[in-house]
Image: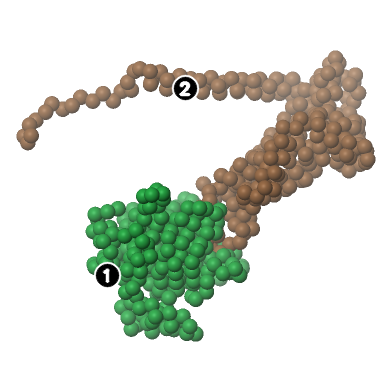
Chain colours: A brown, B green
Amino acid sequence: MAGVTTEPQQVDLREPAGWRRTKNRLATWLMVLSFVLVIVPLGFVLVTVIAKGASSINWSFLTGGPIPAVVAPAGVGGLGPAVLGTIEITAVATIMAVPLGVLAAIYLSEYGGRNWLAAFIGFLADVMTGVPSIIMGLFIFTIWVLHFGLSGFAGSLALGCLMLPIVIRSSYEILRLVPNSLREGSYALGATKSRVTMTVVLPAAIGGIVSGVLLAVARAAGETAPLLFCIGAAETANANVFSGANTALPLQIFSNANQPYVGAAERGWGAALTLIAICFILMIAARLVTARFARYSH
Amino acid sequence: MENPEQNTLAGLEAIPESATRQNVALPEPAAIAEGERAAQPAAGTGVPIFEVNGTSIYYGSFRAVTNVSLTIYEHQITAFIGPSGCGKTTVLRTLNRMNDLVVGARVEGEVSYRGENLYAKDVSPIAVRRRIGMVFQKPNPFPKSIYDNVAYGPRINGIRNKSELNEIVERSLRQAALWDEVKNRLGNSGLGLSGGQAQRLCIARTLAVEPDVVLMDEPASALDPIATGAIEDLMKEIKDKYTIVIVTHNMQQATRVSDRTAFFSVLVNPESDTRTGTLVEYAPTERLFGDPQDDRTKAYVTGRMG
């Protein structure tokens, strides 16, 4: 064997042609295609709403009032009451649903274990996710509005019921993703379970929890059906969320967009753009806040 | 060979248990440890910290470890070696009740720490873990700053004073030989450190609560030889303050750092096809490697098995 010289071996490092390469390229193109298919309608919606709604947006449209009759031409009055109503109703719903939902998720993930109660609550949350929003509205109508009358708060209750299962499910999934090694590291220092949860698990999961909460808030802010029965139709701003009829942007879109009048159509588009802008601003604000919490996680 | 009791006894018989048991009753164990250490070489006996007696550990119906008995002494480094699946990590996690966190884990037999039964009804695992710290196989720094990682333990123990915390953080990082590398970036994330640095950060985090015992579960298995050397030097440096129990796959590491070594092995029951870990031999490190009494130890330490 020794001393035998051989020709340097030729190696071909190019990607071999054939079925494997075809499959690989096919998969890549399929993914690009899916991405385009998803982005086109999204972009279309956004572009249309901006194109048709931007012209009606101005300061008095956003803050002024009262809400004009549908026959009124564009430029009369403003949707200020609806902007205020959307913000206060969604805010109260968030204040009720988010702490409850996150705490429920913590219970399910950290404390429940294989407990039957945890399994039951998890099951209920899953079922609640599938309940149509109009049913939530009817539910609140029967148990609240019939006794206490129309109010922004009734709308908040309906929206809160809608948000709760989304918050529970998304927070739970994120909490399960926190590696067990972090929990063990904390336990090994003599931490109690609540300490471990509050100082290690929650901070590690906060970014994902906020994402889930935002989804729930955005979903609630855009809901029309549950509000139909609950908040009535106010034409002037009602800062008191707990009594009296109120109004919200989705309701204004609903009542203006099905009218044949030019002014109503323009107000409908304007209200749609305002709603998208509110959700967008909220999203950016929440991202900035969580970036501070999560600054050590990468 | 199939009877675990005989095997564990073979390893234990050499230890003068009667002499060590008496020390437990004496009022000042720390003072005695000083005296004992002065009088005896490293491999000698001292104050017993842990006494494990006829202990079996179960996960559900699976018996992970069968009938282990051994005594771990103060200010010594005790190494657990053995092939995979022999239960050394399980035994280690029993010593600070980490196995409580595993659903279905159960301990039979006696495990005592400084004469107190660790599994007595009124013993709080929280209190146990405050005295008996643990360093894990995979570095697990918290997603917090380096400073907050080290200050975590003292903070949960109620220390709020800023200057006191600064002092503890610096001292712990110095003990873990990490201070010089991180002193200018204590505010950076603990996740940005390299593997070896992260493991030393976890050691510093454990030392910051000034535990009595440090349990280490293969602390160097994911590290390069230089980082491993740093951690081994560190263990030797801190052992006059702490008692250390280390699980290792690396026999050279056991010979380099430990005073006593316990060799665990797997018992296979061919009839039911079940496996369980058992203690084969426990002796001063030099003797276990130089003059092993059991054939399986001999085979393992000379490299013919595992």
Q: Residue at x 73, y 36 (%)?
A: A128
Q: Chain of mark 2?
A: A
Q: In the image, residue B178 lies at what x, y percent? A: 42, 61
| A228 or A293: nearer the viewer | A228
Q: Residue at x 51, y 62 (%)?
A: B107
B66 above or below A47? below
Q: In the image, residue B185 lies at what x, y percent? A: 48, 57
Left or right: residue A6 compared with residue A130:
left
Q: In the image, residue B168 lies at what x, y percent? A: 51, 68
In space, the residues marked 1 and 2 are separated at their CA atoms by 62 Å
Mark 1 falls on what kind of element? helix
What mark, if any, has residue A27 been given in the picture?
2
Q: Does mark 2 fall on the same chain as mark 1?
A: no
Quadrant, the N terminus of chain B: bottom left
- Which amino acid does the dot numbered 2 rest on? Ala
Q: Residue at x 55, y 53 (%)?
A: B103
Answer yes or no: is residue A13 visible: yes
Q: Chain of mark 1?
A: B
Answer yes or no: is residue B89 visible: no
Q: In the image, residue B269 lies at what x, y percent? A: 38, 52
Question: For mark 1, what is the residue?
Answer: B287
A289 above or below B55? above
Left or right: residue A55 compared with residue B95:
right
Mark 2 falls on what kind of element? helix
Quadrant position of residue B160 = bottom right
> Which one is in front in this view, the residue at disc 1 or the one at disc 2?
1
- Which amino acid does the dot numbered 1 rest on? Arg
